Image (tube, grey):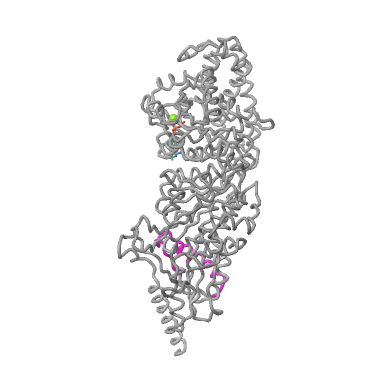
């Protein structure tokens, strides 16, 4: 009784033998127009996919019982989605729900040379031969079928589905090659409980916001409503009440247990979206069988009677009824088909458990930044072309400018060089961004490439993911660092895991520009001066850049865009707001923080740091390791300490926070006995922690351990007003600390001498 998989399996044969079938919700006769829509043989074909999907679920559980399978969330009750696998083209990019087994099986039939059964079972057993993730996760995904793998985080794929749908016409208008054909569309499947997630709600709102403005958005949201999320019931009619009246989004409902109703409605939806390029919310009523997953004990929240009643609505029984009623197959033929598929899957099951698994850490890691479709960056525009694009500004390129201006110039050059590059975010278009970094780009490159998003960071990043998966090169802007946090899953859970879970078959290259870090004079309090990068530092494969000045900023941003374009990398580029307009370094008017715009070919490689040092280090010199605003203060301190106090300080500007170039940093650090780390971020979780640990480790290889000191920001949020910089590293604190270090050194020298 507790093993419902066995019961459901046996009941299918039993009910079929006794011709005991669940009734259809409404009578749909297979005749006239419907026969034209789907031939009897095609109905059998759909049914076959449904049975394959069911047996995959059953076999997964059998394999799990002998610890051979690691994933048992199944598709039982949802097998109607086979119909979507038939009527949507395999080139329509599909972001799937984890109950889309039958969809996968059916879509596979559109492309020769793929085995749905073998591939699915390789992923059940986490074999390294699993063609999509190489044994890293059981995901539905396939390059050939245009199905990017999804993570387990429910609803996180909706924002990128919106982005991908939006990118279809964008690619066409810009005359760019794209992954999704220009008459293609995007499918996005999710469950009824997931529809409540703020990520889903946000994405559906974004779709509505776009379609409401008559911007093309060929997107089908498919909500597979089984009325429950693990053990929590969805209120009756909630999905329909909630989603049937969204501006710009057509609502269509289908009986997901009835193949004929699904065929009719799917055809209607497919034609509508493909022709009108407008989105649909396709509501499919299904059931969930066999609990949430193999480990879910459904008896904890459902009675046996409830479970049996649900199971009797088995979509396979509904399909069998339709085929028998219409004299397409007999019950014996269906049982024969059911058993033949069982035998086939059992056979494959015996084989897949012999296939290799991932074992070594380096094998597992190998796909973190993998990319199997490397590209070469387009040619840079000629000087003549640049002159045209820059217009009046061209003559000023060699005039020293601050960071904001040089980043602006860089974006102009990059937009001119990469035809697929798009800059978007809140207020980036006509206004030119809060800090003018995107000033004028809208006028130069137009609304197709430089556009305002709605106010939702999740959608901004989702748009980036979707654009990237369709071949464009997104450069989204997040207005302030503090505001990336409500959307960080899009970078952390989605963008950065894509290559990993697809062995680099899918990537979503992007450069996310974020204005951030503290020290803004007279503005903002905590939310405009957020000072923590911790959330990015631990993401495997992510490139995290923090320029300290415009010269570096320009050359680093170019490199970031190249890394994204050529290697599919995900890059976060944090721009220190306080340095955007900073012109002087040591004294008013010295223009020490203004730089001429570097030549277009000039880039800084990932991991290349700057070393501001006037001479080879002497025994008691101090090395400051820092980045961002810390560089600015450290250089000021360096001058004062050197000129007034004859104390030699050398400053290493990391530029790249992740990945850290450990060996190279150590090659400088090893010559020092005194190291000071200046970190403007909150101490806990800050880079300083990682740097100290890294240095201690590296110094193990030498006989000496240097003194390592840290000045980091307090573990506190930032206030408004005059005390905004209290608790943050300052020039004077750096000077004081260097004094203390040198005093200590002198004491020690004296002690040694007196011994
Ligand atoms: C963001 C997030 N929160 C929680 C979970 C755990 N979880 C996995 S599936 C699920 C229920 C989803 O229900 P529904 O969307 O109705 O899909 P169904 O399983 O019913 O097909 C939950 C809570 C998760 N995967 N992701
Ligand atoms: Mg559900």
Q: Residue 418: x and y, percent?
A: 60, 50
Is residue 32 at least partly visible in the picture?
A: yes
User: Residue 303: which quarter of the image?
Assistant: top left
What range of the chain is rendered magenta? Answer: 677-703
User: Residue 684: which quarter of the image?
Assistant: bottom left
Give the tally of numbered discs: 0
Residue extending farthest to the right is 113
Q: Is residue 556 above or below residue 471?
A: below
Q: Residue 746: x and y, percent?
A: 44, 84
Q: Residue 704: x and y, percent?
A: 53, 75
Q: Is residue 322 above or below residue 726?
A: above
Q: Is residue 21 left or right of residue 201?
A: right
Image quadrant, ligand 2: top left
Q: Is residue 74 left or right of residue 146?
A: left
Q: Is residue 751 above or below residue 251?
A: below
Viewer-side residue, 407 vs 355:
407
Viewer-side residue, 61 vs 460:
460
Is residue 138 at least partly visible in the picture?
A: no
Residue extending farthest to the bottom is 754
| Residue 362 drawn in magenta | no
Q: Residue 683: x and y, percent?
A: 40, 62
Residue extending farthest to the front is 392
């Amino acid at each position: 009784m507790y093993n419902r998989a066995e019961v459901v399996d046996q009941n299918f044969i039993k009910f079929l033998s006794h011709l005991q079938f669940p009734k259809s919700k409404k009578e749909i006769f297979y005749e006239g127009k419907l026969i034209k829509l789907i031939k009897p043989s095609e109905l059998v074909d759909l049914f076959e996919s449904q049975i394959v999907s069911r047996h995959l679920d059953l076999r997964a559980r059998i394999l799990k019982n002998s610890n051979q399978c690691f994933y048992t969330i199944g598709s039982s009750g949802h097998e109607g989605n086979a119909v979507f696998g038939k009527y949507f083209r395999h080139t329509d990019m599909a972001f799937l729900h984890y109950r889309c087994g039958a969809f996968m099986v059916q879509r596979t039939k559109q492309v020769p040379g793929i085995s749905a059964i073998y591939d699915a079972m390789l992923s059940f057993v986490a074999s390294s031969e699993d063609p999509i993730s190489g044994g890293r996760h059981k995901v539905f995904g396939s390059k050939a079928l245009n199905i990017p793998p999804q993570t387990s985080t429910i609803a996180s794929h909706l924002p990128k589905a919106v982005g991908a749908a939006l990118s279809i016409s964008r690619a066409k208008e810009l005359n760019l090659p794209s992954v999704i054909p220009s008459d293609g569309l995007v499918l996005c499947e999710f469950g009824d409980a997931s529809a409540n997630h703020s990520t889903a709600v946000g994405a559906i709102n974004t779709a509505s916001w776009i379609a409401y403005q008559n911007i093309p958005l060929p997107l089908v949201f498919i909500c597979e409503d089984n009325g429950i999320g693990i053990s929590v019931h969805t209120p009756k009619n909630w999905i329909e009440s909630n989603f049937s009246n969204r501006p710009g989004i057509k609502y269509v409902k289908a009986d997901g247990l009835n193949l004929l109703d699904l065929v009719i409605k799917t055809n209607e939806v497919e034609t509508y979206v493909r022709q009108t390029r407008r989105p649909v919310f396709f509501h499919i009523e299904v059931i969930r069988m066999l609990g949430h997953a193999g480990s879910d004990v459904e008896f904890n929240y459902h009675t046996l009677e409830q479970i049996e009643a649900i199971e009797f609505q088995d979509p396979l029984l509904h399909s069998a009824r339709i085929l028998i009623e219409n004299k397409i197959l007999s019950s014996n033929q269906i049982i024969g088909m059911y058993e033949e598929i069982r035998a086939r899957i059992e056979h494959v099951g015996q084989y897949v458990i012999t296939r290799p698994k991932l074992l070594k850490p380096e094998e597992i890691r190998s796909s973190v930044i993998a990319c199997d479709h490397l590209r070469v960056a387009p040619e840079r525009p000629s000087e003549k072309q640049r002159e045209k694009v820059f217009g009046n500004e061209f003559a000023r390129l060699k005039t020293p400018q601050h960071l904001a201006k040089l980043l602006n110039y860089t974006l102009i050059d990059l937009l001119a060089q990469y035809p697929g590059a798009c800059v978007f975010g809140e207020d980036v278009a006509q206004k030119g961004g809060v800090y003018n970094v995107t000033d004028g780009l809208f006028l130069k490159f137009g609304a197709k490439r430089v556009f305002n998003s709605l106010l939702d960071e999740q959608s901004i990043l989702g748009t980036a993911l979707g654009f990237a998966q369709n071949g464009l090169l997104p450069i989204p802007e997040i207005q302030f660092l503090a505001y990336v946090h409500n959307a960080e899953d899009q970078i952390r859970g989605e963008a950065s895991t894509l290559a990993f879970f697809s062995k680099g078959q899918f990537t979503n290259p992007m450069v996310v520009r974020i204005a951030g870090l503290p020290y803004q004079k007279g503005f903002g309090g905590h939310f405009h001066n957020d000072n923590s990068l911790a959330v990015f530092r631990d993401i495997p494969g992510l490139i995290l850049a923090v320029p300290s000045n415009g010269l570096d900023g320009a050359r680093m941003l170019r490199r970031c865009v190249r890394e994204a374009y050529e290697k599919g990398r995900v890059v976060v580029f944090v721009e220190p707001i306080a340095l955007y307009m900073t012109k002087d370094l040591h004294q008013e008017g010295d223009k020490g923080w203004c730089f001429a715009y570097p030549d277009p070919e000039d880039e800084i490689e990932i991991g290349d740091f700057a070393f501001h040092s006037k001479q080879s280090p002497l025994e008691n010199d101090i090395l400051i390791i820092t980045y961002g605003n810390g560089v600015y203060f450290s250089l000021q301190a360096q001058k004062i300490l050197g000129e007034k106090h004859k104390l030699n300080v050398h400053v290493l500007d990391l530029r790249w926070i992740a990945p850290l170039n450990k060996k190279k940093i150590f090659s400088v650090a090893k010559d020092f006995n005194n190291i000071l780390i200046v970190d403007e971020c909150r101490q806990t979780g800050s880079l300083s922690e990682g740097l100290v640990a890294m240095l201690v480790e590296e110094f193990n290889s030498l006989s000496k351990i240097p003194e390592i000191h840290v000045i980091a920001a307090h573990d506190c949020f930032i206030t408004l007003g005059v005390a905004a910089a209290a608790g943050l590293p300052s020039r004077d604190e750096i000077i004081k600390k260097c004094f203390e270090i040198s005093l200590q050194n002198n004491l020690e020298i004296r002690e040694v001498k007196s011994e």
